[in-house]
Image (cartoon, grey):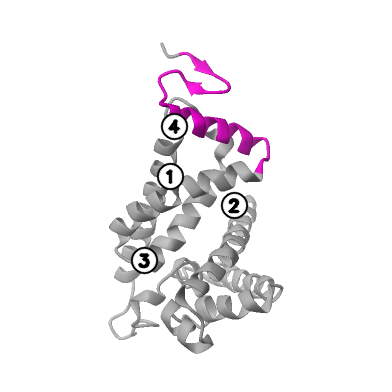
Amino acid sequence: MEIENENTGNSSFSEKAKADYKLVLEARAGNQKAFAELLGKYRDSVYYMIVKMVRNPDDAEDLTIESFGKAFKNIKSYMPSNAFSTWLFKIASNNTIDFLRSNKMQKNNISIDKPSPTSDRESTSWAENTLTAPIKDPEESMMKEQKEKLMRQVVKQLHDDYRIITEMRYFDEMSYTEIAEKLDLPLGTVKARLFRSRELLLSIVKDINLNKDRI
């Protein structure tokens, strides 16, 4: 039987896993630096795993942030029976599988006489999937419209540097490259700014979904 220690986790953990568990405990206590360290340690690894699954860099970036968001939101449920990295990669993998299944279902539901809203694969993103999901009934349609209105209201509160890029990406459905060319900005700058605003949008959508579940 494995003996667990509150400060180090599972006694069979490697030194790296023990260090991760220490960061997890600090993150649970509200230490934002601990969250940042965990993100910094595993962001690239999670991204490379996801990009192999979805074969699209933009989707992979969206899914990476979403996966970390889910992990950090549920970090109190993490149990040190396995390494934090194992738990994190499982969340990222499951989240990506759900995304792929959702995309497959949406493609199967597209009418052959209705062209896709965009022929640019790079424009497909988390926000597009959220806002353009198939509508099943009038009530769902109304909720979708309310969600989009709320997202637009929040985006308007962002600094112009982030607001303009976010609107171009998520509402005008422009690709990263198109935005960079339109605003005469380096591609890396566009991605960095969207990286920051995306976390806020993800948080909003999660709150909306939680409220919907309580109705």
Query: Tags 2 and 4 in contact by the CB under 8 Å rule?
Result: no
Q: Could you say where residue 94 lies in the image, as x and y percent from the top left?
A: 38, 47
- Read off the magenta span: 3-31
Q: Which quadrant holds residue 11?
A: top left
Q: Residues within 10 Å of mark 1 (few under 14, many from 20)?
A: some
Nearer to us in this view, 190 or 212: 190
User: Which SS class for mark 3?
Assistant: helix
Nearer to us in this view, 184 or 59: 184
Indicate the amino acid at tag 4.
Lys
Q: Could you say where residue 108 lies in the image, as x and y percent from the top left?
A: 29, 69
Q: Residues within 10 Å of mark 4 (few under 14, many from 20)?
A: few
- Magenta span contains residue 5: yes
Q: Could you say where residue 128 lies in the image, as x and y percent from the top left?
A: 46, 72
Q: Is residue 63 left or right of residue 120?
A: right
Q: Residue at x 33, y 85 (%)?
A: 115
Which quadrant of the rendered structure holds the C terminus? Answer: bottom right
Between tags 4 and 3, which lies in front? 4
